[in-house]
Amino acid sequence: MVPMILVMGTIFCLSHQQGDSLYLPALPGIDKLAHLLAYGVLAATTLFAFGERWKSEKAGLTVLITVFFCLFYGITDEFHQSFVPGRAPSVVDIVADFGGAGLVGFFWLRLKGRDEGRKDGVRGNCRGRIR
């Protein structure tokens, strides 16, 4: 749980910086990529905080809760930015936050499915085939 809290604190501190004090490269969409990555990391650390529960039969529910937790945190972060000089809330940022968390959730479930296939002695596209 500590990594998750550290990521949340980092996101909060970064969003509390005034708009003119942010140093991002002058590349189009770099701020959206930063949101995608930050909330992807938040989703991964949140899934780790769930411990073994994400490996259970309810892994899909765990990922869904994680993604919506990250979405909620992103919404509150954008609300927080409305009080910071030089910053403004953005729906597009929230979409990027949701996208980062959703991508991590998707790949997490894919890896879980792959690991289950290995436990059953089945690999790759050979599921259900007799060798």
Image (tube, rainbow, N blue to C red):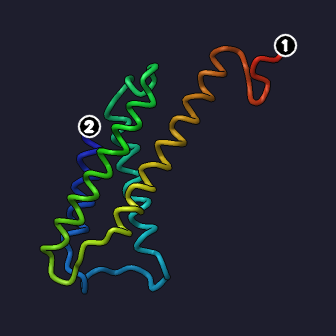
Up the image or down, 64 lies above or below 88; here it is above
The foreground one among 104 and 22 is 104
Q: How many marks?
A: 2
Q: Amino acid at mark 2?
A: Met
The foreground one among 23 and 116 is 116
Residue 122 rendering spot, x and y as whole percentages: 73, 19
Residue in the picture at 43% in, 59% down: 37
Residue 94 is labelled as none
User: Which residue is labeled 2 in the image?
Assistant: 1
How packed is label 2: few (under 14 Cα within 10 Å), some, or many (20 or more)?
Answer: few
User: Which residue is labeled 1 in the image?
Assistant: 130
Image quadrant occupied by the N terminus? top left
Taking the image as shown, residue 77 lies to the left or right of residue 63, namely left
Image quadrant occupied by the C terminus? top right
Residue 62 rendering spot, x and y as whole percentages: 38, 32
Taking the image as shown, residue 20 lies to the left or right of residue 128, namely left
Residue 80 rendering spot, x and y as whole percentages: 16, 66
Up the image or down, 90 lies above or below 99; here it is below
Residue 68 rendering spot, x and y as whole percentages: 33, 45
| Distance between the alpha carbons at the discs numbered 2 and 1 | 43 Å
The secondary structure type at the circle numbered 2 is: loop
The image quarter containing residue 93 is bottom left
Q: Mark 2–mark 1 contact, CB under 8 Å?
A: no
Residue in the picture at 39% in, 79% down: 24
Residue in the picture at 25% in, 53% down: 73
Taking the image as shown, residue 129 lies to the left or right of residue 40, namely right
The foreground one among 80 and 41 is 80
The secondary structure type at the circle numbered 1 is: loop
How packed is label 1: few (under 14 Cα within 10 Å), some, or many (20 or more)?
Answer: few
Q: Amino acid at mark 1?
A: Ile
Which dot, 2 or 1, sits closer to the camera? Answer: 1
Point out the tag, 2 or 1, that comes first from the N-terminus. 2
